[in-house]
Amino acid sequence: MARRPLSLVTRLALWAVGLFAVSLPVFWGLFTVAIDGISRDVVDTRIVEFGSQLRGYWASATAAGNADDSSIGDFGTSDVGWVWQITVDHGTSYRSTLLRLADAEIETTVAEPRPDFTLRTANTGFGRLRIAERVVAEVPPGGTGPVVAVHYLAAIPVDRYDAYVAEHAARLQGLTLLVALPVSLALLALFAAMILSIRRDLSRMGTAMRRFEAGETERIDGRFPRELQSLADRMNALLTHNARLIDRTRKYVTKIAHDMNHPLAVLKNGLDGEADPDLMKRQVARMTGLIDRYSSLARAIGPEGQARGRTGIAEVLADVRDGFSIVYRRTPLAIELDCDPALSFPVPRHDLEAMVSNLVSNAHKYAESRVSLQARSEGGGLRITVDDDGPGIPAAAREAAFNWGKRLDEAPPGTGFGLSIVRDIAVLYEGTVTLAESPLGGLRVEITLPSPHDTPAPR
C-alpha cells in the first residue's frame, strides 16, 4: 500500500524546524564575524586616537623650543611596542623610544594633507605593523612662523594588534548567543505564525467545502487569500458549469418524455385494437427521429463539450457552407463566407458546428437569395455573424424566438435544434447570442464567445 503523503502543514512545520536548526550556526557565524569587525574598529580607533594626541605633543614641543627629540622622553606610553614619529617638512623631528634606539624611521605613504588618518598594515624593519598616518598643515604655536606640513604616524605590531582585537572580541562573544538564539527563536515563531495562518485558511476552505457537500450552500462561499481564492473561484466555476449541464439534462429529459408520450400512446392503443401498420411505422419512425435528434443534442452540450485545444474556424464554416450547398442543391442559394483562414479558437468542433449549422439552416430556410457567414476575432474572443435577406423577425418577437415553444418532432428535417439550443451551447462558454436586423434586410444572428482568460468566475 502506498505511503500516505505528509500534510502541507506538517511539511511546513518540518521546514521550520530545519530552518531553526540551520539558523543557529549561521547566525552564530554572522555575529562572530560582526564582533570581529567591531573589535578591529575599536582597536583602530585607539591607534587613531593615539595618533591624534601626537598633534598636542608636537605643539607642546615646538612651543618649548625643542627642535628635535634628543632631550625629550617617550610620549604617551611606556610600552615600547607602540611606535610613533612626527615628521616636519619631510625631516624627522620626533620619534618614539624604539625608533630612537634603532636610529630608524618608518616609511610614510601619505604625502598630502588629509582630514582623517589613513589606516594600513605594512611590513617594516620592525615587523608587520598596523599604521595610522596623516599629514596636517600646521601653524606653529603663537602663529610666529610659516605654515608647515607635519606628518603624524602611530603604529603597533600586528601581533599586539591581534591580541587587542581578541581581547575585545572575547568581551563581546558572550553576547553572540544572547542575540543569535532570540533571533532564531523569533524566526521560528514567525514561521509558526505563518503555518497557523495557512492552517486556518485551509480549515476555512475545508469548512466551506463541507457546507457545500452538506447542501447548506450552493457554492464554496468565503473570502480566502489570493491563491486559495483562485482555487475556490475555479471550483465554483466548475460547479456552476456542471449545474448548467444538469439543468439542461433535466430539461431535455422532460422534453423527451413529453415528445415520446404521444407516439407511445398511439402504439399502445394500436396494439389493443386493429392497428394500421403504416401508422405504427410512422410512429416508430417518429420516435427514432426524436432519439437521433436528442442524441445529437446530448453530444453537443455534454461533458465532451469542454474546450481541449484550438479549432480552425474557417475550416468549420467552410464545411457547413459546403454541406448546405449539397443538401439544398435543388434550391440554390448564395452562401458568402468571410473569415481569416488562420483564425482559431478554443472551442470543440462539434459544439461550433452545432451552433453554426443551426443558424445557417434557419437562414437558408427563410432567405430569398443570399446568406452571409462571417467570423472574426475581437479582443481574444470570437464573433460569428449569420445574415440573410429573408423577412427577418420583428424586434418585439426576437426574445420569444429563443423559447421552447416548438416541438422538435414537428420540425422538418434539417432545421437543427432551435435558437434556444444555440444559446444554451454559447452560455456554456460564457457567450451570448443576439438577434438584430441584417444589413441584407433579413435577420442577423451574432454568436459572441469571450476569451477563456477573460471568462469571469461565477460569484
Image (tube, helix red, strand yellow):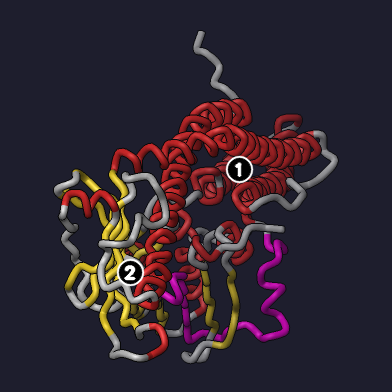
Q: Residue at x 32, y 58 (%)?
A: 154
Choose between 266 and 156: the one closer to the eye: 156
Please provide percent x and percent y for residue 104: 15, 55
Q: Residue at x 51, y 78 (%)?
A: 366
Residue farthest toward the right in the current orientation of the protein? 216
The residue that label 2 is drawn on is 343
Question: Can the viewer see residue 153 in this picture?
Answer: yes
In this rendering, position of residue 401 left or right of residue 444: right
Disc 1, disc 2: CB below 8 Å?
no
Please provide percent x and percent y for residue 437: 57, 88
The residue that label 1 is drawn on is 287
Q: Residue at x 71, y 73 (%)?
A: 400
Label 1 or label 2, whichever lies nearer to me, is: 2
Residue 188: within the magenta?
A: no
Total marks drawn? 2
In this rendering, position of residue 188 left or right of residue 350: right
Task: Judge the density around disc 1: few (<14), some (14-19), many (≥20) Cα neighbours within 10 Å.
Answer: many
Please provide percent x and percent y for residue 10: 61, 26
Choose between 189 and 248: the one closer to the eye: 189
- Check disc 1 and report its element: helix, strand or loop: helix
Magenta highlight range = 377-406
Please provide percent x and percent y for residue 49: 44, 61
Task: Judge the density around disc 2: few (<14), some (14-19), many (≥20) Cα neighbours within 10 Å.
Answer: some
Label located before the other in sequence (1 or 2): 1
The alpha-carbon separation of the residues under discs 1 and 2 comes to 40 Å
Three-letter residue code for mark 1: Met
In this rendering, position of residue 174 left or right of residue 80: right
